[in-house]
Amino acid sequence: MIFVTIGLASYMFSAVCASTPQEEAQALADVLKQMQFTNYTSDIPPCTWNPDIVTCDTTTGLITQLNLSSLGLRGTLSPKIAVFQSLTLLDMTTYNNSLGPPNSINGPLPDELGELTQLQYFNFSFNPILSDFPPCLLRLTNLIDLRIDTTNMSGAIPPQISQLKNLQHLYIGNNQLSGPFPAEFGSLIQLIELTVWGNNLNDRIPDSLGNLVNLTYLNFHDCNMWGPIPASLGNLQKMNKLWLYNNLLTGIIPEGLKGLINVVDLNIRSNYLSGEFPTWLPTLPKLKRLDVSKNYFAGPFPDLNESQSLLSAFVGTPPVANCDLSCNYFNGSYPVDALPNINVTENCFDNSTKDSDSCRRTLSCDKIKYYYDQGCTPCAPNQKIYDYPNCLCGPIGWSPFGSSKLPLGAIVGGVVGGVAVLLAIFALYRYKPTVFTDPFQRKKIDYGAWEIPSGVQRYSFQELSKATENWSNSHEIGEGGFGKVFHGTLDDGKSVAIKRASNMSLQGTLEFRNEVVLLSRLHHRHLVRLEGFCDDRGLQILVYEFMKNGNLNDLILGIKKGRPLDWHKRLEIAVGVAQGLDYLHSFADPPVIHRDIKPSNILLDNECIAKVADFGISKETPELSTHVSTRPAGTAG
């Protein structure tokens, strides 16, 4: 009986609160009148008035769609718009002047608009909102399609936009929005189209956009975006059109973009991208339009013979230049056999005739060669390099460490602080050894199951045995305090370094788990990355990324043959080590003191980029939260 009473009361309440067709007729007349439209009065039932403007539910007689586009509307949107509680579509833009006079509805949008909780489509483009991003829109959690292009919106994009989980189409381009660009966009996994062009965002493109696996169109042009093109964008295998042109992007084109297997139109012109042009880029299987003009690409001109999809596109009379590599710094012989739909003008070819100055390059061919010899091309105006090996630039005063000071100061300060801590540790150990006494007695305890950290692979002993040909001596690449190190190749083809603990260095179960947990939290380009672990059969094995060029000690002493280390490369390695240590000492959670820095613990990848190894950090604790040991460890370094 009580449920019947509650249900009846709920029905009566909704009946009282719901609008009636008569109330909606009056509200529609008021809303249109406030926007200077007088061709409708409340005497006319809305559902029988004009089917191009009003759509109703045939059962309730309530309005579900209002198409107010191209009606010549002026004034402001009335708060009485909240009367239409069944509304799923509200269109107030101007699609085409030929369809009717353009609207010019002034903002700000009324807060009552946020009460239309059934609204799925809202288009207010080409009307002057003249305010910050309207907070009322953040309450419309059923929105599928939101278009507020060209409205003179200002201020920052609110991170709370991530509340609109059902969004599939978001158009907020050509406004006055400023940065930062919220990383929270990465949670809008239903997005199909995202266009934010023509705003002064002055920020990096967040890696989190790689989560938007349904995205087919991403438009970031003319937004003052800087930093790298995120490799995570390669996860967007449904991407059809990717526009990043007219920004301040630096660095190379990441190999991760090989994942764009369905991209048709890729436009990254007018940036500060550098390095050799990636030969795989024109071979993307669906690519029909490619524009990389007005960048710093150098080296030999790419062989486009395998780019069948690109070469066969848009060939006509006259042919359309659908592949634009002009205004870069390609060298070698002029590609006289280039097809007519490929633009190769304004480069540094040996035997080319003088072209026009249409691309307005700021550097000559001789000058760009000088910069390449130094390692990195120049940054955009008012920017400085913050990641030298990858030639990434950022605004003056910005730091990857979150400080307003220059990165060099942060690096030096971190290293000096780290040395001071090390000296203090040594002094404590030398004169107060009891400070480091382990208060927890080691016992053989069955700790049971545990939650493996995300991003870390748990390997079986059989998998690693197979990868090393049953721990063959031919796979052994080193030996340290922890045990022997083997080079292995996993079933997926990945090369890894496998560190197998000796019986003398075995830790307690909890201590080993602590080490795995802590190592899984450490992510920096100058630290050797933990790929996984193995605790099968009571063994303790750590699996790291494989560093092709071995350690710095062997390379310097000539024990291992490899790339010659000139003065510039040595300085680059030193800075990389400092950045890795600064991260460990100041920004890791919890902070880590390395305790064993020496050339043999500095590993070099295939590009001779330095990565710090052998942190030697775990210590058993009564809980699964890692405590960093501060005892001296390893060999004297």
Image (tube, helix red, strand yellow):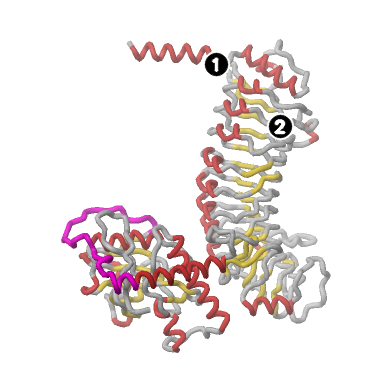
Please tell me whether mark 1 or mark 2 is closer to you in this view. 2
Residue 292: image quadrant is: bottom right
| Disc with the residue nearer the chain's start (1 vs 2) | 1
Q: What element carries label 1?
A: loop
* Segment tinted magenta in the rendering: 426-455
Mark 1 = which residue?
Answer: 18
Q: How far is mark 1 from mark 2, CA to CA?
A: 27 Å
Choose between 203 and 141: the one closer to the eye.
203
Total marks shown come to 2
- Residue under the image location 60 percent in, 52 percent down: 240
Choose between 169 and 322: the one closer to the eye.
169
Residue 243: image quadrant is: bottom right
Q: Is residue 77 left or right of residue 564?
A: right
Q: Which residue lies furthest to the bottom in this view?
A: 558
| Residue 186 sits above or below residue 333 on the image | above
Image quarter in which the N terminus is found: top left
Choose between 588 and 62: the one closer to the eye.
588
Say whether residue 469 is visible. Answer: no
Query: What is the number of the mark on residue 107?
Result: 2
Choose between 334 and 188: the one closer to the eye.
188
Q: What residue type is labelled 2?
A: Gly
Whether residues under marks 1 and 2 lie with C-beta atoms below 8 angstroms apart, the answer is no
